Image (cartoon, grey):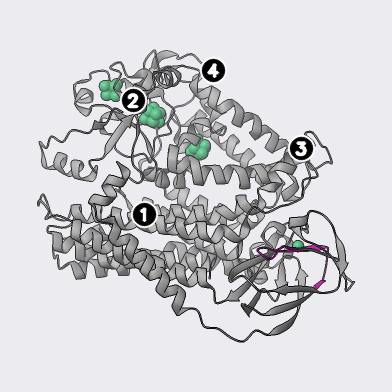
């Protein structure tokens, strides 16, 4: 019943417009830049990271040093299999790969090769105070294809849906205006 | 599958309009389809059976909040309330089961017990228009407060302190504890569930978003209600209490203020109450400005929280968290922005789009006010889906706290089930953005298609109706883009 209604209402227009929009958006937002290597020191404090946002390009290599300005913090970078524990006052920190369990090692720099595009959050993984669950930063790996494709796809969806509603709408039986 | 199509018998102008408002959609009467369910909801044990588990958890939350660790993510008061309960409520109960939470909510339990003075029986008698014996003063609620403005303001006020509320077990327990006390006081002074209908801060968004829900309690035939002499659904009788939410089933067409307590199913002598399954977002009628503003407040809050709680800016977090940082000037700035954007800015923007909508439609008779009020419904599905998208990271990223806190509810180092040591482990965090994109698109779909339904009752001709949709669809698209920017960009 569900699908039948969609077919009757020419839902394929919406599907096509969404796909075209997503492709167009994804392509439009995909400039490429030569890979570079960047040294970044991330300072954690209650309840934010500095820098709060890292913007880099796909193919870049990030060399991350971590420091804490107050208490023990964590650094869990989603999508890149990194989790660290940062203690204040020392230059080294504990690091592990979440996919490999809890084998903590000591390190003074994390090397992250940016192979995946999109927005990835780094979150505090060590309870550090009241707002701890909301302590996070963002790594944006350009081109942020999910975002651009999302924008294009949703715009296409809206246009397609509007066309579909226009085509399938019937003349109204006038009852009372403006009530 | 039995499908019940609501009959369309236009007799008066008003009736014709109600039939257009009620979009003619298929319904499945669950009570007819599942006799066991029918038996269950007609049982006098129904509501208490639902309340019992939540009452137990509620007490655990109070005890843990007052005596347990102050560290939020290690205390069941925070983890169960703001991660588990919140997610279940906004993502599952409200969209699929309307206000079923209000049937199992522990807050009005003692107040209702005080009024009824019995757990399971129905006391016959006379209390004002009711045919039940009720304890208490049973005062009427003042007419000018019969709207959800009190809830709008109390909810916004509570949410201004949310950074404190959702991180401090003690504060959460204090707020919940005082709500239960208020609930009792109101039940002793005022009639029935006045507390729920007009005071409870949670109630406002439950009422607004329950309009989208796939579940409804309705009269099987309103003609039967017209003929009915007793009107037991609202007055009560020996089988059930009069509707605690003051609903007369013969005119009941919106989910907003029905607490799904199933008393009317028990009391109706004609077995005329259905529990229907229906398509998502079947009701599209915002009745008054208090409801419209509730929508703007919810939308504003979803945006604010996306920035404050899910964002990266430490400064704003410090402001919202003034209790710890002492940055009260910042706190004032932040609350000023929050209040003015949800009470003034968003409605003003929408007013602009409503004005454009009228202008482009070419219709001269319809007022901007009508356009504004009717189309303000689009922020209901948009807001709900944005809230679900916002709440998704709460459960996916921080859901593992549920596993550890179950073994150590007070944060005292217990290990009841051997899971206390379970390390914080986000679930597929890097894929959340894709689910969020789908959720936002779903919200846009329902906003636009329901706007079309609304346009057909607002305007005279197809052309006017469709033209008027252009600015409204654009507004919905912009809202979607804003959330996309927060979540993915
Ligand atoms: S309105 Fe509030 S207090 Fe009343 S049942 Fe619903 S959630 Fe509970
Ligand atoms: S008691 Fe039953 S038939 Fe009578 S008005 Fe109420 S729902 Fe209708
Ligand atoms: S209409 Fe009233 S009595 Fe019936 S389920 Fe809803 S709240 Fe309960
Ligand atoms: Cu931290």
Looking at the image, is mark 2 or mark 1 earlier in the sequence? 2
Relative to B5, is B229 above or below?
above
Asked whether B324 falls inside the magenta stretch, the response is no
Q: How many labels sit on residues? A: 4
- Residue B92, horizontal then vertical, whole percent: 49, 42
Residue at the image point whose x is 45% and y is 47% from the top: B205
Looking at the image, is mark 4 or mark 1 earlier in the sequence? 4
- Residue A55, horizontal then vertical, whole percent: 62, 78
Relative to A50, is B483 above or below?
above
| Nearest to viewer (mark 2 / mark 3) | 3
Looking at the image, is mark 1 or mark 3 earlier in the sequence? 1
Q: Report which residue position mark 4 lands on.
A: B119
Graded by Cα atoms within 10 Å as few (under 14), some (14 to 19) or many (20 or more), the crowding at tag 1 reads many
Q: Is mark 2 within 8 Å of ligand 2?
A: yes
Residue B248, can we see it?
no
Residue at the image point whose x is 12% and y is 53% from the top: A172
Q: Quadrant of ligand 4?
A: bottom right
Asked whether A67 falls inside the magenta stretch, the response is yes
| Nearest to viewer (mark 4 / mark 3) | 3
Magenta range: A66-82
Disc 4: host chain: B
Q: Mark 2 touching mark 3, by CB under 8 A?
A: no
Q: How far apart, in angstroms, are the residues tagged by discs 1 and 3?
A: 43 Å
Q: How far apart, in angstroms, are the residues tagged by discs 2 and 1?
A: 27 Å
């Amino acid at each position: 019943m569900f699908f039948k209604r969609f077919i009757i209402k020419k839902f394929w227009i919406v599907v096509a417009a969404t796909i075209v929009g997503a492709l167009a958006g994804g392509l439009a937002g995909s400039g490429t830049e030569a890979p570079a290597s960047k040294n970044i020191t991330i300072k954690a404090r209650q309840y934010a990271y500095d820098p709060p946002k890292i913007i880099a390009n796909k193919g870049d290599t990030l060399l991350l040093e971590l420091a804490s300005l107050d208490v023990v913090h964590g650094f869990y970078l989603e999508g890149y299999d990194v989790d660290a524990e940062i203690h204040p006052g020392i230059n080294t920190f504990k690091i592990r790969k979440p996919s490999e369990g809890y084998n903590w090692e000591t390190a003074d720099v994390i090397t992250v090769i940016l192979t995946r595009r999109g927005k990835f959050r780094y979150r505090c993984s060590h309870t550090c105070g009241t707002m701890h669950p909301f302590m996070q930063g963002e790594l944006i790996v350009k081109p942020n294809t999910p975002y651009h494709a999302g924008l294009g796809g949703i715009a296409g969806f809206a246009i397609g849906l509007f066309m579909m509603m226009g085509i399938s709408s019937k003349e109204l039986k006038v009852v009372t205006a403006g009530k | 599958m039995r499908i019940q199509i609501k009959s369309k018998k236009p007799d008066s102008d008003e009736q014709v309009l109600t039939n257009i408002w009620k979009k003619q959609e298929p319904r499945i009467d669950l009570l007819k389809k599942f006799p066991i369910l029918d038996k269950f909801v007609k049982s006098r044990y129904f509501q208490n059976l639902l309340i019992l588990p939540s009452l137990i958890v509620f007490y655990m939350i109070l005890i843990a909040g007052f005596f347990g660790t102050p560290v939020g993510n290690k205390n069941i008061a925070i983890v169960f309330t703001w991660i588990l309960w919140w997610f279940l409520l906004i993502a599952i109960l409200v969209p699929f089961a309307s206000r079923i939470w209000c049937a199992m909510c522990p807050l009005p339990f003692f107040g209702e017990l005080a009024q009824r003075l019995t757990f399971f029986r129905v006391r016959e008698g006379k209390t004002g228009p009711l045919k039940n014996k009720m304890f208490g003063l049973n005062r009427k609620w003042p007419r000018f407060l019969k709207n959800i403005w009190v809830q709008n303001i109390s909810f916004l006020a509570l949410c201004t302190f949310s950074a404190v509320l959702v991180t401090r077990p003690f504060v959460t327990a204090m707020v919940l504890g005082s709500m239960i006390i208020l609930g009792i006081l109101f039940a002793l002074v005022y009639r029935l569930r006045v507390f729920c209908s007009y005071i409870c801060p949670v109630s406002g968004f439950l009422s607004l978003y329950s309009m989208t829900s796939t579940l409804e309690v309705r009269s099987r035939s309103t003609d039967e209600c017209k003929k009915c002499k007793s009107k037991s659904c609202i007055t009560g009788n020996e089988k059930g209490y009069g509707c605690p939410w003051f609903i007369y089933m013969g005119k009941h067409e919106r989910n907003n203020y029905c607490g799904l307590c199933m008393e009317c199913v028990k009391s109706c002598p004609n077995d005329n109450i259905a529990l229907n399954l229906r398509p998502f977002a079947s009701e599209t009628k915002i009745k008054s400005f208090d409801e419209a503003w509730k929508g703007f407040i919810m939308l504003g809050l979803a945006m604010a929280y996306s920035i404050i709680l899910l964002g990266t800016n430490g400064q704003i977090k410090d402001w919202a968290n003034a209790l710890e940082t002492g940055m009260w000037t910042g706190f004032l700035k932040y609350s000023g922005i929050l209040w003015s954007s949800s009470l003034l800015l968003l409605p003003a923007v929408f007013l602009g789009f409503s004005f454009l909508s009228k202008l482009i439609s070419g219709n001269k008779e319809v007022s901007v006010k009508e356009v504004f009020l009717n189309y303000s419904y689009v922020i209901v599905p948009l807001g709900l889906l944005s809230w679900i998208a916002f709440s998704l990271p709460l459960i996916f990223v921080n859901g593992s706290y549920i596993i550890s806190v179950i073994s150590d509810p007070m944060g005292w180092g217990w290990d009841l089930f051997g899971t206390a040591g379970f390390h914080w482990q986000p679930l597929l965090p890097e894929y959340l953005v894709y689910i969020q994109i789908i959720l936002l698109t779903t919200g846009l779909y329902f906003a636009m298609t329901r706007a079309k339904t609304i346009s057909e009752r607002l305007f005279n001709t197809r052309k006017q109706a469709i033209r008027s949709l252009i600015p409204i669809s654009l507004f919905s698209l912009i809202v979607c883009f804003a959330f996309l920017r927060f979540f993915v960009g």
